[in-house]
Amino acid sequence: MKRVYAFESKCLGCGLCEVYCKTAHSKSKNIIKANKEENIASAIIIEEILQPKVTSYFALQCRHCANPKCVKSCIAGAMYKDEKGIVQNDKKKCVSCLSCVLVCPFGAVKKSADGKAISKCDLCVDFGESICVQKCPNEAVKLLDDKEAEVLQ
């Protein structure tokens, strides 16, 4: 299965992956409306690492684990792994208990912006290819299988 991998050495912290993620998952599909008017959480988050004389960034998103703790902890059955191995969330079933947020070892599952469900990367299954991968100007975010990622890291 292919997953989104982030490469810290190439990330400038520009946040375009976050902007385009919000836009792709918005109702309007308009970059301005999606990021200023609609209350949408990005499924990918840029984290900043402050070190003396050097600041680096990395993208944080769902790893679609082989044995996802979030799926096992979901009391409502809203979190599930589909036939392709993608960890999905049925927002209609979600009761906002946040157990999935608590057990995610990567911090990639979070409360949605509206507070009614959780938010996480869905690999943009509705759009073909992950939008963060398409729009990253530095190729700091890539869609790779585990073997491809191992070679590049």
Image (cartoon, rainbow, N blue to C red):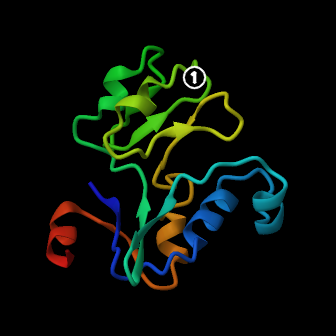
Question: Where is the N terminus found, in terms of image quarters?
Answer: bottom left
Secondary structure under the numbered disc 1 in the rendered image: loop
Please say if 119 is above or below 153.
Answer: above
Q: Residue at x 24, y 63 (%)?
A: 145
Q: Residue at x 31, y 41 (%)?
A: 105
**109 vs 86, nearest the viewer:** 109
Q: Quadrant of residue 103?
A: top left
Q: Quadrant of residue 52?
A: bottom left
Q: Position of residue 147 (x, y in %)?
A: 15, 66
Q: Position of residue 55 (x, y in %)?
A: 43, 78
Q: Quadrant of residue 90?
A: top right
Q: Which residue is mark 1?
A: 96
3 left or right, relative to 112: left
Q: Position of residue 73 (x, y in %)?
A: 35, 21
**Kind of residue at badge 1:** Ser
User: Which residue is the extreme one toward the front?
Assistant: 52
